[in-house]
Image: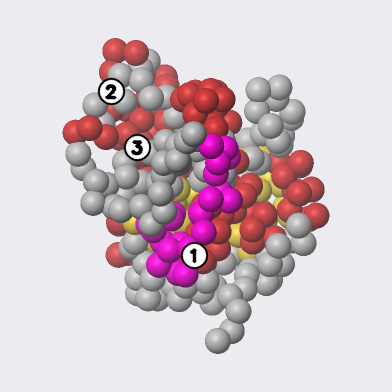
Amino acid sequence: MATPTLQGKTLFITGASRGIGLAIGLRAARNGANVAIAAKTAEINAKLPGTIYTAAKEIEEAGGSALPITVDVRDEAAVRNALDETARRFGGIDIVVNNASAISPTDSQATDMKRFDLMHQINARGTFMVSKFAAPYLFKAENPHILMLSPPLDMKEKWFAGHTAYSMAKFGMSLVVLGLAGEFRKQGVAVNALWPRTTIATAAVKNLLGGDALVRASRTPEILADAAYLIFNKPAREFTGRFLIDDTFLAENGVTEFDHYRVDPTQDLAVDFCVPEDSLAPAPLARLHG
């Protein structure tokens, strides 16, 4: 059986200057992929690590070819131009990762409409638009994939109460998966969603959700990167319309060790929101103490 490879494949990843998007790009780069880093951060920000240029340097040091592009996924012209530039540079586009996301887990009374609009424009609308304009390139690719970093469509009140605006925007990304998986099935483009069972150690988790304590109770972005790598190597015509939980999917593909993804092995892992109750973890989330 041939070893899975992304050698020579081109990935277009939104929000790839740091965190999960960068981790997915680095995993592909180690296999010789081309990575377009489509993100907003072009200048150093004291609160947020990484820019499109530092990410590009990491991609190239990992063995891939990088194209840093300043892109606001709310801007139609910027998205079109970035996709065109990526295809010109690398000869096409094989994989699109919709990772860019805005989060504000506030209740209705604490959510101002400007923030509501921002989340919907980036999460739902941005995901739809990037996928829409990438599609003509993907139709020409050998094994094309679109991947959303978005949750399973588990429509329970508890996933919305307390942060309705954010949940609507994030579930909007998953609705794009549901629709485009069906729309693009005849063209052989796989459209899937990937979601972490636990919180992931990113700047958003640290700055907006729980600080250092939640970071220590999280897994690293590499768990999603490893899962994404396996998804991209699945046959697109057969593997589409799936809503995958990272560790379950990895376990189904032969992974048995998960401890190395823990930020702090002494801490119990914090379960992410929107993980369905019937989704059983393949590895313990709690640690024995004492």
| Mark 2, other Cα within 10 Å: few <14 / some 14–19 / many ≥20 | some
* Drawn side of residue 187 relative to residue 44, left or right: left
Q: Is residue 201 visible?
A: no
Residue highlighted by disc 3:
273
Kindly identify the amino acid type of the residue bearing the numbered disc 3: Phe
Picture residue at 51% right of the left edge, 54% below the top = 258
> From what the image shows, is residue 281 above or below residue 181?
above
Expressed as whole percent of the image width and height from the top left, the position of residue 236 reads: 44, 72
Q: Looking at the image, tell me whether mark 1 or mark 2 is earlier in sequence order.
A: 2
Q: Earlier in the sequence, mark 2 or mark 3?
A: 2
Which numbered dot is residue 255? 1
In percent of the image, x 30 and y 19: which residue is there? 107
**Which of these two is toward me, 40 or 18?**
18
Instruction: Give the number of the mark in front: 1 or 2.
Output: 1
From which residue to which does the magenta span run? 244-266
Q: Which residue is mark 2?
A: 162
Q: Residue 153's mark?
A: none
